[in-house]
Image (cartoon, helix red, strand yellow):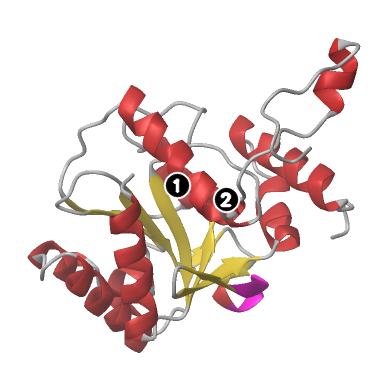
Amino acid sequence: MTDTRVEKYRSIDDMNSAPARSAPPSDFERFLRHCARYWAVAPRTYPRGVFRFRTIEDAQRAKPGRTDSTS
Amino acid sequence: MDRDEIFRVLRAFEAAGLEYVLIGAAAMGFHGLVRATEDLDLIIRATPENVERLRAALREAYDGDPQTEAITSADLLGDYPAVRYYPPTGDLYIDVLTRLGDAARFETVDAETKEIDGARVRVATPAALYRLKKGTVRAIDRQDAAALRERFSLQDDD
């Protein structure tokens, strides 16, 4: 059972409620892989050096190419 | 964001004895809530000695990058509690905070130690991340707070 690569469901609801099986890398490794994919799709060029801000809000406004999709 | 670079930085933090707490998306990642980010966010203890540890760690991680000398305790303990460092690799940037708003600082952010690939990392707890994010105005923070609340069954008084 555990070797099978095919799973069958009677409905899309059953399929969606079944957890996807995967080898369990750590959560942080999953995070790193996800970021690596993001970087591959949307590479950035950053400036160099150190920048200082009076508030975290100022820092967030100054994020390069800022969108609300990452932080 | 390069895996080896991240681990090099985290190991350098540990080796330097930096007193820090990882917050932001990387901390969320440690807790299984995965989303993309371009930076590492950390709160450090606000002492001159700890700022020197931060500089030492970044010098170690980035081949003595002279830009790290611009990270000063005069700024971080003074009028500039938020400093952004862009390493020479260009693959990510590091946001360093000594205080966040009026309430949050190193001493007030609950953290736990996570071990990953031989590196010990201080990570804000889910409840601490929730407290940091739930009252902010950014949409992404509100989404993070909602995800934390659902995953860890947090309440508004957590």
Extreme residue in the top direction: A11
Q: Nearer the viewer, residue B156 or A17?
A: A17
Q: Are marks 2 and 1 on the same chain?
A: no
Q: Is residue B84 visible?
A: no
Q: Position of residue B154 (x, y in %)?
A: 86, 53
Q: Residue at label 1?
A: A32
* SS at badge 2: helix
Q: Position of residue B109 (x, y in %)?
A: 64, 70
Kind of residue sitting beneath label 2: Gly
Chain under callout 1 = A
Q: Which residues are magenta?
A: B107-113
Vertical relation: A62 (above or below) B13: above
Q: Is residue A45 visible?
A: yes
Is residue B52 one of those drawn in magenta?
A: no
Q: Residue at label 2?
A: B29
What residue is rendered at 20% in x and 33% in y?
Answer: A45
Q: Position of residue A37 (x, y in %)?
A: 40, 31
- Per the model, the C-alpha gap separating discs 2 and 1 is 8 Å
Q: Is residue B156 left or right of residue B11?
A: right
Mark 1 crowd level (few <14, some 14–19, many ≥20, 10 Å Cα): many
Callout 2 touching callout 1 (CB < 8 Å): yes
What residue is rendered at 59% in x and 42% in y?
Answer: B34
Q: Position of residue A5 (x, y in %)?
A: 66, 28
